Image: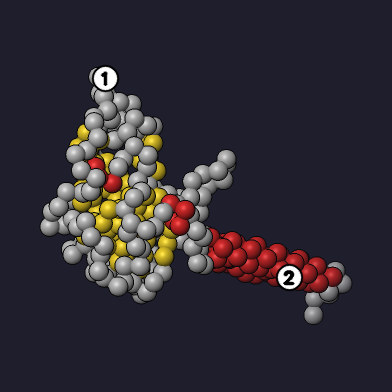
Amino acid sequence: MPTSPRPLTRVGRRVALAAAVALTAALATAVPAAAHAEVEADRPRALAENVTLSFVSEAESSSAGFTALRVVLPEGIAPGDVTLGEAPKGWKLTAASDGYTVSGPALKPGVDAEHEIDVRQLPDAKELVFKTVETYSDGKISRWIELPTGDKEPEQPAPVLKLKAAAPGAEPVGPGTSSSPSSSPATSATPDPSPSATVTAGSDTEAKATKADDGGSAGVGIGIGIGLAAVAVLGGVAWWLVRRRSASPES
């Protein structure tokens, strides 16, 4: 007696459903964290003066809060031309040779770190890159310092500010009158004394910032590999079950 196609159809649907669920779970574990760092400007135009830049670092830890942000300034913006504006309560700015650090008491877990800086003048450029290194209260460091290479999108992209062309008649202003940020209640020219601020101002360089993050990009690559392997195994099992069912008479 010919085998009825109905049991095969039921088995095929069950296997397909199980494979789809497993595929969704595998891809979900392989996707990089959605947290990232961003920068915006109130006047994103080349050679604009007295510009306020707003930075946001999205929290990616549910058990630790931000304690410090290390920002490498792009060419054309000197640390002495930067002053701290809005920032988390108790946070201070410390100038470095290639940028600055804002740090202070740890924020609550899951709270984004937001701060503003006032820049004397933006350089004559099409875009500005602000490599950012984030430090958490548990010692974890997250580095948003990567740039696109060819067609490959970076896993931890650095904040990039795109600029409009300079206004007609705009000219570069002369160098600032001081080499360090002006003093204010929210600004300090001395290193932050907090022991949790593991990003040391004045001694970190861009070369240090480009070191790989512990468990960062490598972890994402491993997750993608595991996800693809799981999909391949499930596909083989599904094929075997369907072939076995179609070759067996209905009991």
Q: Residue at x 26, y 24 (%)?
A: 171
Judged left or right of residue 233, residue 57 is: left
Give the class, few, some or many, for how many residues have Cα within 10 Å of label 2's Cα (few <14, many ≥20).
few
Residue 7 vs residue 244, the one in the foreground: 244
Figure quadrant of the N terminus: bottom right
Q: Which residue is mark 1?
A: 168
Residue 19 shows in the view: no
Tell me which amino acid carries mark 2: Val
Residue 178 vs 247, above or below: the answer is: above
In front here: 248 or 229?
A: 229
Q: Residues within 10 Å of mark 1 (few under 14, many from 20)?
A: few
Describe the element under mark 2 as helix, strand or loop. helix
Q: Above or below — where is 83 with respect to 3?
A: above
- Disc 2 target residue: 237
In this rendering, the answer to whether 241 lies above or below 153 is below
User: Residue 82: image x %, image y %?
Assistant: 24, 45
Q: Give the alpha-carbon distance from disc 2 to disc 1, as whole Å.
A: 67 Å
Name, please, the residue furthest toward the top.
Answer: 169
Residue positioned 27% across, 28% down in the render: 172
Q: Quadrant of the C terminus?
A: bottom right
SS under mark 1:
loop
Q: Position of residue 123 (x, y in %)?
A: 32, 33
Mark 1 is on which residue type?
Answer: Pro
